[in-house]
Amino acid sequence: MRCRRLLPVVAMLAACHGQPNETPESRTDGKVATSAPAREETVPVEFGKRLPNTRMTSDNMPFFDTMTYCLLATRKTDLMVKGPAYEACIENQDHTRIVVGDAIDANRFAEADIIRCAKESRTAYVGMWYCMNGRPSSE
């Protein structure tokens, strides 16, 4: 009796998931599974609010949530949450944020380049700094 109840459930599961040896790339319906972690590791940039016609400064420059970025970036290398790699990441990001802020205050970069690089950065302030200097990110 138990077998008869399980058979329809197994048939439904098999129908929903397709052939067991089927890979997402070989599916004929055109849908390919995307990997969520790649999108998850990109921490979005936030832009400070400024009055119209005011220049960007270190107080209102683009902001990255470095805690979230470093947690995501070090979760596979650190043996514990907020371990040594996390601490090094936070320190590097904070230092780079100060350097970027000083460069913005000194008016070293065009505002359009700062905004473009902040949007393109996948490694928070470090990636933004490399982009603003025309070099690929090393992190």
Image: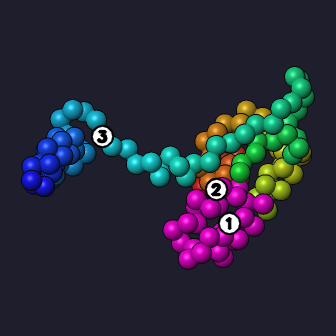
Instruction: Residue type at mark 2: give it.
Output: Tyr
Q: Which residue is rendered at x = 38% and y = 44% of the image? A: 34
Instruction: Residue type at mark 1: give it.
Output: Cys
Sequence order check, earlier mark of 2 and 1: 2
Report the front residue among 36 and 131.
Answer: 36
Instruction: Residue type at mark 3: give it.
Output: Val
Disc 1 crowd, CA 10 A, few/some/many (<14, 14-19, 20+): many
The residue beneath circle 2 is 69
Mark 2: which secondary structure? helix
Mark 3: which secondary structure? loop
Q: Give the CA separation, mark 3 to mark 1.
A: 33 Å
Query: Which span is picked out in magenta?
Result: 66-94
Mark 1: which secondary structure? helix
Q: Nearer the viewer, mark 2 or mark 1?
A: 2
The residue beneath circle 3 is 32
Q: Is residue 75 above or below residue 43?
A: below
Percent position of residue 97, x then y: 78, 55
Q: Which residue is rendered at x = 58% and y = 59% of the image? A: 72
Disc 3 crowd, CA 10 A, few/some/many (<14, 14-19, 20+): few
Marks 3/2 in contact by CB < 8 Å: the verdict is: no
Report the front residue among 13 and 78.
Answer: 13
Percent position of residue 122, x then y: 59, 49
Residue 103 falls inside the magenta stretch: no
- The way the protein has been coloured in the rendering is rainbow
Q: Which mark is residue 89?
A: 1
Q: Which residue is rendered at x = 66% and y = 76% of the image? A: 84
Q: Give the CA separation, mark 2 to mark 1.
A: 9 Å
Disc 2 crowd, CA 10 A, few/some/many (<14, 14-19, 20+): many
Location of the C terminus by quadrant is bottom right
